[in-house]
Amino acid sequence: MLLSLSLVVGTAQIAQGVPWLELLLRGIQIIQLSNMSDQQEVQIGQQINQQLVGKQFKLYRNREINRYVDQIGQRLAKRSERPNINYTFQVVDDGNINAFATMGGFVYINTGLIAAADNEAQLASVMAHEIGHIVGRHSIQQIKQAAIARGLAEAAGVDSNTMVNLGVELALRRPNSRQHEFQADELGIKNLKQAGYAPIGSVDFMKKLLKQRGFIPGFLSTHPSTADRIDSLEQSIDSNRAYVGDGLNNRAYKNKTRAVRNQKKAALKRTTGRRGRVLRSAQLAQEPQACPIVFLLTSRTVRR
Ligand SMILES: [Zn+2]
């Protein structure tokens, strides 16, 4: 309460016309979107995270896997273009191949994605892409657009509750724009290289997912922007340096992530039996993806 009080007082001037005394009494902050401080962003990110974890999805509780993913994430974050905030990398217990991020340094990686990657460089490429969304402050821009479109934004800004609600919705259900995807790719590949990973991981992973036509519904796998993204990633990799760096030891990666793979196999057997692949494809088609990492693969993204 003390903190929010100081924030409201701090922005009271901008919040002219908003009954800020009332907001203050209710403990709601007015966030000025065009000029959000890192501290405010982290605070809102924490609140969004609280709404997501345990309510919208379940975290994967395996200490070894979590430690491994965090270690990769921190290595990348340190060499990102925004190393001065804390990053939290969490593993989501979800077999869909997906990853997403929200403001203030929160990155989420599904177990399905960990299981789908061949090596650490591939997993790191997705995580670097997600960090790219945070570096580019994409979710703040998305929230701003959504708030304006729905008439929820005052001239002064958006109240923190609205912002958290929109943040939860966007993190889970709204794909980023093409422009943001390209920018996250660009920042991601740069970060991957800076952190000493072999850049080929990013291209390999996208190509791999595209090839799995039995797994990915056909109508989604033909999205042209996937090819565009692979092209632009390839262009940003010096072919002599593509395989230079860490993370290409497939066997080491499989060993480290065995728990996730075993879980996936067991789940598939339990829920879908022999027709598992077919059912999983149908399921994938229905589920909107938050950060279309290759996912592109969703019809919503196709229309953008
Ligand atoms: Zn993305």
Image (spheres, rainbow, N blue to C red):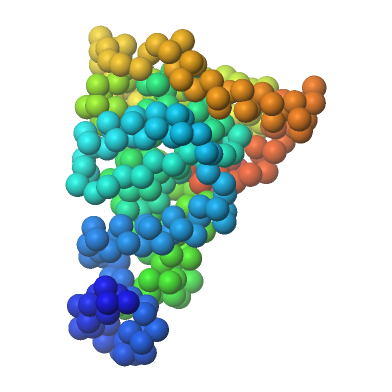
Answer whether residue 98 is visible to the viewer in this image: no
131 vs 274: above or below? below
* Residue 164 pos. (x, y %): 43, 65
**Residue name at image x 48 percent, y 15 percent:** 255
Would you identify the image quadrant in which residue 108 lies? top left
**Residue 241 at what x, y percent from top left?**
25, 13
- Residue shown at 52%/30% (left/top)? 113
Judge left or right: residue 206 versus residue 280: left
Q: Quadrant of the N terminus?
A: bottom left
Q: Is residue 300 left or right of residue 238?
A: right
Compare residues 44 and 54 and report the one nearer the observer.
54
Tell me where residue 61 appears, x and y as whole percent: 52, 38
Q: Residue furthest right?
A: 274
Residue 287: name its quadrant.
top right
Q: Is residue 79 positioned above or below 209 on the image?
A: below
Residue 194 pos. (x, y %): 22, 27
Image point 46% across, 58% down: which residue? 50
- Residue at the spot 60% in from the left edge and 43% down from the top edge: 299
* Residue in front for this viewpoint, 201 or 87: 87
Q: Is residue 303 above or below residue 126?
A: below
